[in-house]
Image (cartoon, grey):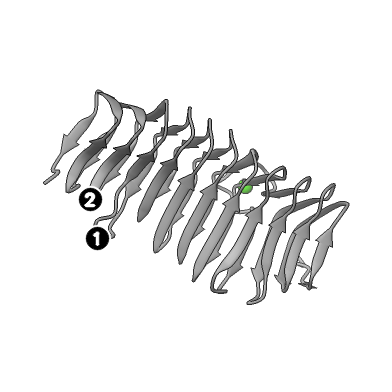
Amino acid sequence: MVHVKQEVWYEREVTGNESYSERHDIFEGVLRVKSGGSLTLVNVTFNVADNGNIIVEPGGLMNITDKDGDPSTGDGCLINSSKADFIFRVEAEAAFHAANSRFEWSHDFSLQVLSDEAHIANSSFSSGRIELYLEGDGCTVLGNVFGCDYCSLASKGDNKRIVGSTIANGVILVDGGSGNVVEENTVTNNEPRGHGLIFFFSQNTMARGNNVSSCYYGLMAISSSVTVEKCVFSDCKYGLLVAYSRVDAQSCSFTNNT
Ligand SMILES: [Ca+2]
């Protein structure tokens, strides 16, 4: 039997290099990764208490990952809480890497990523209402699963790649910016009048290979320029809504939209 360490973390500031693996810790208070600090968690379960928040400050790095680089083996991290209104914020000029891990919340969870250096891959977000808000330029969100009560994946800024995610109930919103790519995502939105993909003042955007179903508008473009390629819109009230926009739709399919 593997002995798993368990500790309670109270208010904590990370200022140097800290790395933890194979632990099951409880976190209370505010965790801050400070400028010059680096916190790596590998196969760590982190239960966040009711007073917990996580802030990665400018110049800090947080890395949440698994042991073997394989998303199928269940040896990643689990960040877990039943706290209402939990905030996990990566500030501008900070860095954040999350891979092959799980984030589980039973209330509202806001992961606010304001930095350019942010990569979130092959992870799952479940339960509660999740807001993943991306504000920097060039971050990537690849191959994640959002199985929450409601999920909003919202981005500002340029040149992001939102690829290969599954959103069981929610929306991908690209608000402003240029050169963003939304590709091969599967999006369902069961909220009344909930939409699938929304582009709002978003220029030179590519939406390619997405599968959007059970939404009010499958895709809404307002004051945007969007190339829509090889997307499938099914069982929506309306496939597309385009206003003050240039939308170039190629090889898309529309089925069962009422
Ligand atoms: Ca793994």
Instruction: Identify whether 84 is placed above or below 91.
Output: below
Percent x, y of residue 32: 76, 60
Residue shown at 49%/34% (left/top)? 177
The amino acid pointed to by label 1 is Pro
Instruction: Look at the numbered disc 2 and give the secondary structure of its residue.
Output: loop
Instruction: Look at the numbered disc 1 and give the secondary structure of its residue.
Output: loop
Percent x, y of residue 54: 68, 61
Q: Which residue is mark 1?
A: 192
Q: Earlier in the sequence, mark 2 or mark 1?
A: 1
Residue 232 is marked as none
Residue sitting nearer the eye, 143 or 59: 59
Residue sitting nearer the eye, 198 or 191: 198
Marks 2 and 1: CB-CB under 8 Å? yes
Residue 168 makes an appearance in the image? no
Residue 202 makes an appearance in the image? yes
**How many C-alpha atoms fall within 10 Å of the one at disc 2: few (<14), some, or many (≥20)?**
many
